[in-house]
Amino acid sequence: MNVSDAVDALLPSVVDDLTALVAIPSVSALPAHAGHVQQSAEWIVAQVRALGCDDVRIVVEGGQPAVIAHFPGPAGSPTVCLYAHHDVQPTGDVALWTSSDPFRVREADGRLFGRGVADDKAGVMVHLTALRAFGGKPPVGVTLFVEGEEEIGSASLATILEGHRDLLAADAYVIADSGNWNVGEPAFTTTLRGLVDCVVEVSTLDHALHSGQYGGAVPDALTALCRLLATLHDADGNVAIEGLSAMPDPELDYPESRLRAESGMLDGVRLLGDGPIAGRLWTKPTATVIGIDATSVADASNTLAPSARAKVSVRIAPDADPGQALAALTTHLEQHAPWGARVRVSDGTKGSGTTVPFQGPFADAARAAFVEAWGVEPVFTGQGGSIPMVADFQQAFPAAEIVVTAVCDPDSRMHGIDESLHLGDFAKACKAEALLLARLAGEAG
């Protein structure tokens, strides 16, 4: 049986195992789910041991549990590190999901639905399927690295890379945590934006006041905060934070009609910013208000609020320095407070973007394997989302080649309600990775 046939034979059991993994609510952001994150790590260890590999361990370096396993290859063969993450985002309002339980996989119209089914537990299963296709004895050395805190910024990843360098060193890395260009069209990601965020608190009073008695002369903090947040963009929706850089626009065309269809924009709503859409999504900065702490509508009274705060998230150009970007954001917020309101900015997370050159013998083998599995040429794209661990791998192992692959498509709705995975594309992704390992060893698919 060749590699492709072996993957085809495995797929029914692989889908069953993906369903079992999704059923473990490994939400790294919520302390109440810490036991589930540990449980999902242990589940992966059990799958590795079932392949006959005992060189597997769970590592914790001040954060969430990660799994590292090593499958030795023949003498003289290269070593490939396969990366994915087993933690997932919170579900949001469960009532908005089509299924009453987001962690119970539902199948419909050729897709699986559930939290983490695409991001990134499908990536975990792509790696395990490739290893299963060779009966746990891959034709090259393979290190499996499954992280447990990617969804909360991979804070301990650098420590893991430093403390377990010998275990994780490889000639090439496959990071299965990005997005494909379309259903049936695979993509390799070559640019990734970085991310900085902060919490800004605006204060105008030392106590709350009756809005009828003092309104009209005394500013309330929530209105002041709204005016401050509005300064993050100009009238056309371009980011107005001085000091943020941008990279040149990509050559790939991203039609407005496609963006509207994929994003679900309402009729009449205009796009933000100027220039090619791919540049706005992949190489230019963004500014988004992702949360506000203020009195809820249900609890509102005729009161001038003394303080209010918001969390601001800024995606930065792939080559931008996160420290400089966070300083620029802080300066902007401090200098644009209306009516003399007091502003206090608390730093949040910082993550580097990066460019990922697609060149070298490993990249050539990956392209050939994907063409064989998918039947079409791959597309080279950027991603507006941040995958900070790519830069961490580049810094830790500068001589290695890195390839960023995907299991998601534009309708997967990662992080959103009714997250889903296209089963046909999942099968092709599994086959492509197994074929890649075979090509690296000089074997026929």
Image: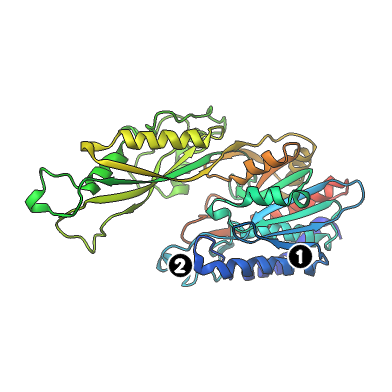
- Residue 248, above or below 13: above
Front one among 318 and 425? 318
Disc 2 residue type (three-letter): Thr
Quarter-wise, where is residue 428 in the image?
bottom right
Colouring scheme applied when the structure was drawn:
rainbow
Residue visible at 73% across and 44% down in the picture: 371
What label does residue 98 carry, if any?
2
Picture quarter containing residue 126? Answer: bottom right
Whether residue 188 is visible, yes or no, is no
Per the image, the residue denoted by label 1 is 48
The crowd level at tag 1 (other Cα within 10 Å; few <14, some 14-19, many 20+) is many
Q: Is residue 197 visible?
A: yes
Of badges 1 and 2, nearer the viewer stands: 1
Name which quarter of the figure residue 225 lies in.
top left
* Residue at image coords 69%, 52%: 83
Viewer-nearest residue: 301 or 239: 301
Q: Residue at x 21, y 52 (%)?
A: 305
Identify residue type, mark 1. Answer: Val
